[in-house]
Image (tube, rainbow, N blue to C red):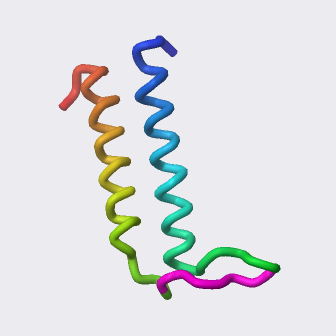
Amino acid sequence: MSDTHALPVARLVKAVEARLASLSHDDQGTMIGGKYQGGNGGLISPATVALADEVRRALNALANLNGRS
């Protein structure tokens, strides 16, 4: 992988990891003491939507490096 692509790929990986963690929390909460606590009962939070937007921006930045729009 070229240096040109390394930072956008790292940004994408970070954004996807954050999005997945947020989705898991929205769905089932966070594991605390062997039990899931909190969460949004499957409802998607505004924070999760914002993280999805970051994934889209990261994908777009990577596509632009590859000459795609």
Q: Quadrant of residue 4?
A: top left
Above/below status of 22 relative to 4 = below
Residue at (81% x, 80% y) in the render: 34
Quarter containing the C terminus = top left
Q: Position of residue 23 (x, y in %)?
A: 49, 68
Residue drawn at 52 percent across, 78 percent down: 27
Residue farthest toward the bottom in the current orientation of the protein: 41
- Residue in front for this viewpoint, 49 or 64: 49
The residue range painted magenta reads 34-40
Residue at point 41%, 82% (across, down): 43
Q: Is residue 46 left or right of residue 16?
A: left
In magenta stretch: residue 31: no
- Please indicate whether residue 21 sits to the left or right of residue 36 in the image: left
Residue 65, x across and y down, in percent: 30, 21
Residue drawn at x 30%, y 53% is 53
Residue at the outermost left position: 69
Q: Is residue 36 magenta?
A: yes
Q: Quadrant of residue 7?
A: top left
The total of numbered circles placed on residues is 0
Is residue 45 rendered to the left or right of residue 2? Answer: left
| 7 w.r.t. 3: above or below | below
| Residue 9, placed above or below residue 45 | above
Q: Nearer the viewer, residue 26 or 67?
A: 26
Residue 21 locus on image (x, y percent)? 56, 62
